[in-house]
Image (cartoon, coloured by chain):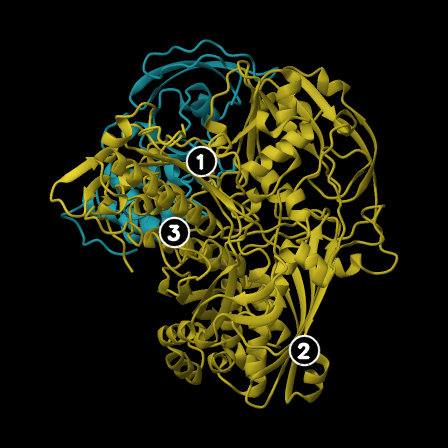
Amino acid sequence: MTTYLATPDPATATHAAPPPLAEPSGWHEIRLTVNGAPVTAQVESRLLLSDFLRDRLRLTGTHVGCEHGVCGACTVLVDGEPARSCLTLAVQCTGAELRTVEGLAPGDAPLTPVQRAFHECHGMQCGFCTPGFVMTATALTEQPERPDAADVADALSGHLCRCTGYRNIRRAVCQALDERFAGGPAGRGE
Amino acid sequence: MSHGPQQPTPDGGPWTGRPVPRVEDDRLLRGNGRYVDDVALPGAAEAAFLRSPHAHARIRSVDVTAALAAPGVVAVWTGADVAHLPAMLNREELRTPPGLAELLDPYVAITPMPLLATDRVLYVGQPVAVVLAENRYLAEDALELVDVRYAPLPVLVDPDQALTDGAPLLHDELRDNTAVAVATKVGDPDAAFASAHTVVSEEFRAHRYVASPIETRAVSAQVDPYSGELTVWSNTQTPHRVREATAHTLGLDAERVRVIATDVGGGFGQKGILYVEEMLVPYAARVLGRPVLWREDRNENLTASSHAREQIHRIELAADAQGHLLAVRDRITVNFGAYNMTGLVVPYNSVCHLLGPYRVPHVDIDVVGVLTNTTFATPYRGAGRPETVFAMERAMDRLAAELGLEPAELRARNLVGPDEMPYATGLVDRSGKPQSYDSGDFPELLRRAVAKADVEGVRARQREGARDGRLVGVGFAMYIEATGLGPFETARIDIAPSGRVKLAIGAPSQGQGHRTSMAQIAADAIGVPFDVVDVVGGDTSATPFGVGTIASRALVNAGNATHRAGRLVREKIIEAAARRLGVPADALDLREGVITSKTAEEPALTLSELAGRAPLPGTPEPTDGRHGTELSETVHFRPPGFAVSSGAHAVVVEVDEHTGETEILHYVAVHDAGVIVNPMIAEGQVTGGIAQGIGGALYEEMVYGPDGQPRTGTYMDYLVPTSSEIPDLDLDEIHSPSPMNDLGVKGLGEGGAIAPQAVIANAVEDALRPFGVVVRRGPLSPSRVRDLLREAGRPTAAR
């Protein structure tokens, strides 16, 4: 999306400073972990986390749908919690551990139970909102105890999907939760 | 209907009809989608558009000096800088089909939209200048430095007002603000109205709302330094049209332009038309000699990408004492916004879908499309049908109330029967031929919807009265949809030496799962396993011709093109195998990629053995003097007419008298789209369409102030339903194969979205029946329901 020619490998890269976004503006060196790999970069104050991930790290699985925090397509996990990368500045993430959709099943690794559930339940059509939903659902499955129906409803209401009518997304999330918490409360529909 | 996890078992049976899991999912789930903004174009400049803050104004001056001097700015162009480019967008959509022109002589005013406004702006959001900079941040910084002086002009928002004498003219070259006008008559409607037992007359308004795909529009372009070819990535539904228009605007041969629409994050019609931004980005890439990217933000998408739905219907029904319809009269006004972008498409769809599944002997419909100072309106999922169904189905309920009949019973008395198919309505269809419903069973659709809706239960609860102020109601709505719009669609099939099948189709996918359903069709047609078929769509280099994925047409047209191409390739394979084996062709069969002799036990030859052992790749043997016997075929399928889908929806709602909130208790949809290729994908399409319809029925509205300022420019104001608002649906289906094509398929991409507004309005009015409320427009948000109750003299909770 930008003119930065560096195509850094998140696993190894220390990123050189790109051309300025604007003047005057502060520059910061940030150090963080992205999908398990250390990343060091020079960023401008106003650089959004979504743009940092997409343009600087070329992690384009994180999608931007509204840029004002409503649609949820840009959701990534920051220290395990779902966060909207379009409302987060990259500089805020110093020291953070970030996970994006690319980190779930890298390369040819088998899909995670959440990803598999979205496929098996037809919980996606155009696929644009999907990474955001998948990251939120992943965080749900990583809770120590099974989230109750209200928690699930609450989590899903932070995401917009325009294709599926949500039913199959709910099914997918329930299937993934059932699989994760097999010994827990019986899987309820909603 | 549940389609849980399952793997198809290649037992030699047909792939068509199975809920084959989608092959596109794995890539998308790993974050490996390739949407426009994901394609890395090193060295790209980014574009940002300066848009009019006025709904109607004269441009007095534009000064770009400061913007040009801003950091990182590469270029700033105004209307004057690009006025030499011959923009003529959406030419295909603006063309009146010859048959329609001959029979109805419609009026169509063409209002070319300038690439950038020069002397006047006609809506808030109209592009006035474009900044190209090193990145989007810098481009947006510079936008603020472009100094435009405007002289505001009088604003027209209301279409009725725009048609009054003396209203300001939006386009100087036109006689008034009429964009299109067409009228049609069947029989003697005046006499029928004069002799009717009962006449109902109402005014219904379909409100304005928008497609709102989660991926906003985007386009990028670069000139390939090696080939000189212009490559455009666009999230369009119609890549071939983008290629033609771009070539026209830039003065290139279309063959030197390649348009790629690989992954598209939802379209729903909004990405089915051509936009000025789509032309200017490739222009910039050529002029600057470097790649250029533009991605719309959400505010731009809501305010400056096309809107839809806003119509006024002044409708009258005439019936006899038993409720049989004698005549329908409707005066339809469509708010086109500032430019006529798609001509008759939406207005005429509204005309020729008004009668729906009902038998109506006398008809009198006219429609005008009106230009106003609002964002242009174009087709959105259903394209004129949800609006017209809202009017007709609301009118049917008013007639039922007038006659004291159950709404479902009134409908049942007027349905065209399955024994009457094909059924001629007396109207003319959109292509200019006599309108004909090819097949269907409307009474069965209604019967199933009624059976599921528990009308008696609702009536019993209504007799008990409201519980805690919660009023229950039930509603019905039915529709027909002409699907599979022509003129053609293309499929090309190549058998590779490995035996893999490459299928290229003209129609791209915006989530409809073409890679899966088209591969199912190809596998059956050729006789190969599903998983050896690779499908390419949305790339003009893969098929030189194509139309696109719009108008519930892809499965019908691309599907049948695929089927025919597959059958032809199959014949070639068997003929080549027969030559190789020295047996007659009719002694051989091809199943799951293996050529067998009908008499021998052993498989004779695999497809890869045939295609791989060849003098040329995929070319078994040059024979009888002809050099080319490649295992390839290209088919352009031209549908002979429309494949007519149909449906009946029923809904039970509970309306809270105090808060005005409507809760959907039970949503039933019974649909008929002929033969179903992939039931899982079909169900997903229906469900998604209904969800968008529920959004329009209850929440979504694009609101303008009288000054032409949009008031719903973000998702904080424009309410797209979330998972919490969309219930599980009770779906059922029947299958009346279409006789219009070999596969018997009909389109269903739009169908789900057609009835929800009407059925929910009918149910809410039924719930509010104790207060004599008439629902005349949507969305039925809590505040609008409370307004209705207040108008009916009911005290409601304070706002």
Q: Secondary structure at mark 1?
A: loop
Q: In this rendered view, identify the residue nearer to me: A171 or B366.
A: B366
Q: Residue furthest front?
A: B624
Q: Which chain is disc 2 placed on?
A: B
Is B460 positioned to the left or the right of B761 in the image? left
**CA gap, disc 2 to disc 3?**
46 Å
Q: Which chain is disc 1 placed on?
A: B
Residue B36's spot in the image, x, y percent?
Answer: 50, 30
Residue B158 visible within the image:
no
Tell me the quadrant of the picture where the N terminus of chain B can be found.
Answer: bottom left
Task: Please tell me the colour of chain A.
Answer: cyan
Residue B187's spot in the image, x, y percent?
Answer: 67, 78
Q: Which residue is mark 3?
A: A166
Q: Secondary structure at mark 2?
A: loop
Residue B187's tag is 2
Q: Which residue is mark 1?
A: B263
Amino acid type, callout 2: Gly
Amino acid type, callout 1: Asp
Q: In this rendered view, identify the residue nearer to me: B239 or B714.
A: B239
Residue B251's spot in the image, x, y percent?
Answer: 69, 27
Amino acid type, callout 3: Tyr
Residue B98 visible within the image:
yes
Task: Point out the frontmost of discs 1 and 3.
Answer: 1
Is A76 positioned to the left or the right of A148 in the image? right
